[in-house]
Image (cartoon, rainbow, N blue to C red):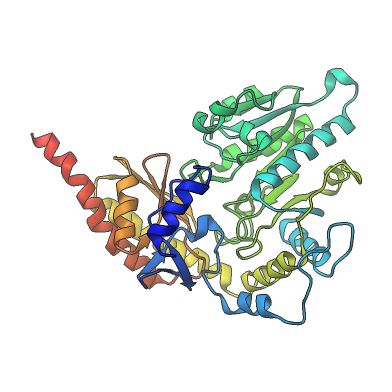
Amino acid sequence: MNFREIADLEKRTLIPTYERLPLLAVRGEGCFLFDENGKRYLDFLGGLAVNSLGYAHPEIAEVLRDPSESLLHVSNLIYHRYQAPLAEKLTKLSGLDRAFFANTGTEAVEGALKLARAWARKNAKGAASERYELLALENSFHGRTFGALSSTWPEKYRKPFEPLLPGVKFIRSNDVAHLRESFTPAVGALILEVIQGEGGVVELHEDFLKEAERLCRANGAILICDEIQCGLGRTGRWFAYQKFGLKPDIVLVAKPLAAGLPLAAILAREEVALAFSPGMHGTTFGGGPLQCRLALKYLEILGRPGFLEQVRERGAYFRGQLERLKAELPIIREVRGDGLMLAAELDAPGKDAVRQGLEAGLIFNCTQERVLRFLPPLVIERSHVDTLIAGLRPILTSLEAPKTQGVHA
């Protein structure tokens, strides 16, 4: 079926939840996607930070083709050879103690909220002191299921489904005074993204993060770091929180973990993890043999000498090129981000820039209406960055022109 046939069929058969780009992807190679006509697209979105090794990575393909492994699923009532080694690897890298495997980021958030509630109830000294409130941040995005959605800030996501989970309060990002004011004896947990992805690639400041950690410790609350988008190599570190020396109680990872297949993990320190006992939480598909095998290979590749250093170097080069473009084009208000999680906030809506980019063979997206977000594969070269910048220049210039003409009129 061609693009038009597929698009028409989707309109008749799918629940209309996505505004798709007009692109029928048929194959991928490295940092490029190809459509049905053979047109090549340089992908600076990376499947929303999932395809961190690009497309058709030879070592990932080798795992998928391995004829010696026949297990796709065995259920979590039975051991298999890959889940425990993966848990050991992730806990060592994160500085935490135990892992629970799920399927998606939002499922990991749900599990973490349950774990925080279970820990608070286990450690409560009487009903009056039970810590049930959850603090989240303005501009946050943690997922679309009810608990995760309750801790997600934008009203457009929450409003249609209210009432949601009670006891959630939002703090202004990077407002230390508001953070302090918000801590009460009822607070059981604080969830945050060190870099808010869907929120426009907004970086939390070190003083805010350190105070968040201090307040959680002082008040007996759980600090949850949502690293679903900013973790596992995206910033050139295993985890974004490691830049600031934070020691969270729970860490959440997903997106690139199984190199394209669904896999997420809740990582927790020992005392918190043991608030769960058999039967309190579970999943049918989380942590299956194939996903865990792929995750072990993904972590092996990231851990090779020089890989993460190269991510930091390419990220610094990319940010530098975006800053140069900002100096040329007033439409760019701000460049933000770390490693290969970057954004350019515009002084105009960015949706048309995404459309023009696709026409020019470039894939990126727009969040918060005006923020162009870039989440390329971690294996990009400087030449890929140069291609993107060269393509962005005329696109953003064309968006500036009508505004400039309006001023002179």
Total tally of numbered discs in the picture: 0
74 relative to 219, above or below: below
Indicate left or right for 171 with 325 as reference: right
Q: Is residue 392 left or right of residue 260?
A: left
Give the quarter of the figure containing the C terminus: top left
Q: Is 167 above or below relative to 296? A: above
**Where is the N terminus found, in terms of image quarters?**
bottom left
The correct choice, above or below, for 249 with respect to 76 in the image is above
- Name the residue rendered at 63%, 73% in the picture: 301
Q: Position of residue 145 (x, y in %)?
A: 65, 38
Q: Quadrant of residue 127?
A: top right
Above or below: residue 284 compared with residue 119: below
Q: Is residue 247 shown to the viewer in this render?
A: no
Q: Residue at x 46, y 68 (%)?
A: 26
Q: Which x, y percent locates residue 156?
A: 49, 31
Determine the residue located farthest toward the top in the rendered image: 128
Outermost residue on the bottom side: it is 67
Q: Where is residue 13 drawn, in percent x and y?
A: 52, 48
Of the pair 279 and 139, the residue shown nearer to us:
279
Image point (20%, 50%), residue name: 398
Image coords of residue 216 (percent x, y): 73, 34
Res. 279 image quadrant: top right
In-front residue for pair 52/209 = 52
The answer to whether any part of residue 237 appears in the image is yes
